[in-house]
Amino acid sequence: MELFLNRISDGLSNGATYALIAMALVMIFKATTLINFAQGEFAMFGGFIALVLATERGLPMWIAVVGAMAITAVLAAGFERTLIRPFDPSDHLPLVIITLGLFLGINALAGIIWRFDPRAFPELFPSGNALTWNTVTLSWYTIGTIVTVAVVAGGLTLLLNTTKIGLAFRAVSSNLESSELAGIKVGPTLQFGWAIAAAVGTLGVCVFVASPFRQLEPNVMVTGLIFAVSAAALGGLDSLGGAIAGGLAIGLVQSIGVPYLGIPSELSLLAAVAVLMLVLLFKPSGLFGTPQVERV
Amino acid sequence: MATTSPKFLFTEGTNRYRAYKIAGFALLALLILIVAFAYNDTGSITLFDNSYKLSITRVTKSISFMVAILGLQVVAGFTGQLSLGQGFFFGTGAYISAWLVADQNWAWFTSLIVVVPVCFVFGLVAGIPALRIRGLYLALVTLGLAAIFPSLIKLDFLLPYTGGAAGKTVDSDFIPPSWLPLDGMINALHSLPLIGQYFGDGEGMSNKEEQRVWTFFMMVILALICFKLVSNLIKSRPGRAIRAVRDNETSAAVNGMSLSFHKTMSFGVASALGGVGGMIYVAELGIASEGDFTQLISILFIVGMVVGGVGTLSGAAIGGLVIAFIPDWASSTQNLPGIPERWLQGPTGGLILGIGLIVITFVLPGGVISGVRKIRGRFVEVLPKTPAIQLAGAGAAVSADESDIPNDSLGSESPDLSTTVDES
């Protein structure tokens, strides 16, 4: 029982970070029905920027993270303007290829700048355990990740529901052509979506590697992206709430399902991919997504 | 195109056209010979104090990538199903043939008897999602497939067969048959005037070199067979069917093509080719290690396909060369004037490929091959056979018509024909 509770706490903290990256994927998917394969690499790059700001510029850690979020948001907005917007949004193949190119390029660039040695990331949350009951522990890190997800989800909801650009974003994601006819500038609105997504993703990676058991290196998000994609697909690719639910579910499957089913630990990725396949095969809209109706 | 008329016109079915084709094949054969004997061991180019290797082993490796990309062309280029999972089948083929050769004492080529059907069936199974999901979702599922391959290799019950994280070593080489005078051939080339110095040292080849050349020849032949088979497939009835599925699913279905049959079949063919590529890869390298078959290799195959040209066969050949040589040459570049040394270390190849992929998508969406064809179109134009009915009906005016028609009406169409069906 104690082990079980500990695993739940592990699963929640992993799941919370998947949820953050998944939310970033969902932000872009909602608006453009495109999956940004480079999302994880944007986020990894942001993590390195935060690390550099904190260790070389000596900024306090949280300010460094916010700074990195801002920088990656600007970078992503630039990428959207120069690389994504020139293409027809309904033709996916060139766009997927562009994001794959970004994936390769950013991963390699980070490898050239920062090399592949894993680096310790300063802790964002107090170390130690918040609660101890017999052998059951709930670390500050777990609490911190969950609070971060809640804050981000709340912030995004406020942003989308109360601001003008949030309204424009929702209009564009609901119907691109009509909103263009209604006078919304579609390009800058999508750019805003990309910027927000990159910022959220950066926060996700910072929280992910702030765990005392993880380190930052250029390949940290290569498999993390698969988990996040499964989370987003499980929750429904166009639902922010679904991304959180999906992320937590994938985290729990990884930490509870895998050990109890006696599957070796390296197969947690397999479990995530199995979830992804089953969801897409039997319920492509996910748990909370909008079902797509296709007219033949 | 319309303003400058090509300098050389060939009409299909004439002797001139046949001579043109034969000249093309002769050039290819000459190129293969030069690669085999001139760049056997020491071939390298020195530029700014960096030496770029042209060794034949890397060419053999690129052949394995070519065959895998060829498979990707079938499923992604011709059927339009974006698969990011080709690395999975590449790895499957590599491990199966490594196991058969190392533990069961099979020969490399007989291992294909198992590799091809197994990969084909795996591909059929992997193609099932393509029946329900398409586009991006399919890309996601197949990317997941590619990502789990290294973990599958490390499964406990597979360890005796795969060697786990240490990799599977195979020390079986291709021994050239004794009747083949490889020594004599290179010595003959060496004694040629002027160019002889580039071919060996006049003292024949060591055993190792002979094996390398022999492996190369065998793999070239295998790859040529694969290319010919796919080219026939694309030109035949099922090939037209899958291209119809790519261009418009609804109209293909309305015209009586079974979407599910053609999609799963093309996945099967693509995966079988991926398996063949994996066999070539492990036969050349002598070791199958899980680190080589991550999702990165699947993405590299996509890079190769796009850089070469989506939906072309010769694009697969160019793509294979690109993804085999660019990372290697990039890492050999240790000093370039004007660029600090620090920026030349690390995964520069990945950066170049990533940027190259984006640039190609912007500048040359049809890949390198479309550029080559555009340039070739300035000089050479192949005209389709003049329909017999014109010859019969037009009577005395035929000879005059024949020279006019191609330039005006057919002339603009023939490049399109050659983009859909590749000739090499």
Image (cartoon, coloured by chain):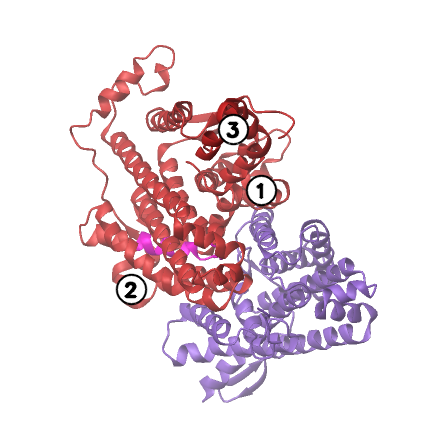
Chain colours: A purple, B red
Query: 10 Å neighbourhood of mark 2: few (<14), some, or many (≥20)?
Result: few
Cα distance between the residues tagged 2 and 3: 55 Å
Query: 10 Å neighbourhood of mark 1: few (<14), some, or many (≥20)?
Result: some
Please state, as top left, top right, bottom left or bottom right, where the C terminus of chain A lies in the image.
bottom right
Residue linked to disc 3: B381
Q: Nearer the viewer, mark 2 or mark 1?
A: 1
- Whether tag 1 and tag 3 are in contact, CB under 8 A, the answer is no
Cα distance between the residues tagged 2 and 1: 38 Å
The range drawn in magenta is B79-95
Report helix, strand or loop for mark 1.
helix
Residue linked to disc 2: B158
Please state, as top left, top right, bottom left or bottom right, where the N terminus of chain A lies in the image.
bottom left
In the rendered view, tell whether residue A292 sits above or below residue B259: below
Report helix, strand or loop for mark 3.
strand
Type of residue at label 2?
Leu
B139, B148: nearer the viewer:
B139
The label on residue B356 is 1
Residue A15, position as x, y percentages in the image: 56, 75
Is any part of residue B304 visible from this angle? Answer: yes
Asked if the stretch drawn in magenta spans residue B93, the answer is yes
Type of residue at label 3?
Glu
Type of residue at label 1?
Gly
Q: Nearer the viewer, mark 2 or mark 3?
A: 3
- Which residue corresponds to the image point at 60% horizontal and 79% vertical from the top-left? A288
Mark with earlier residue (2, 1): 2
- Whether tag 2 and tag 3 are in contact, CB under 8 A, the answer is no
Residue A188, position as x, y percentages in the image: 78, 59
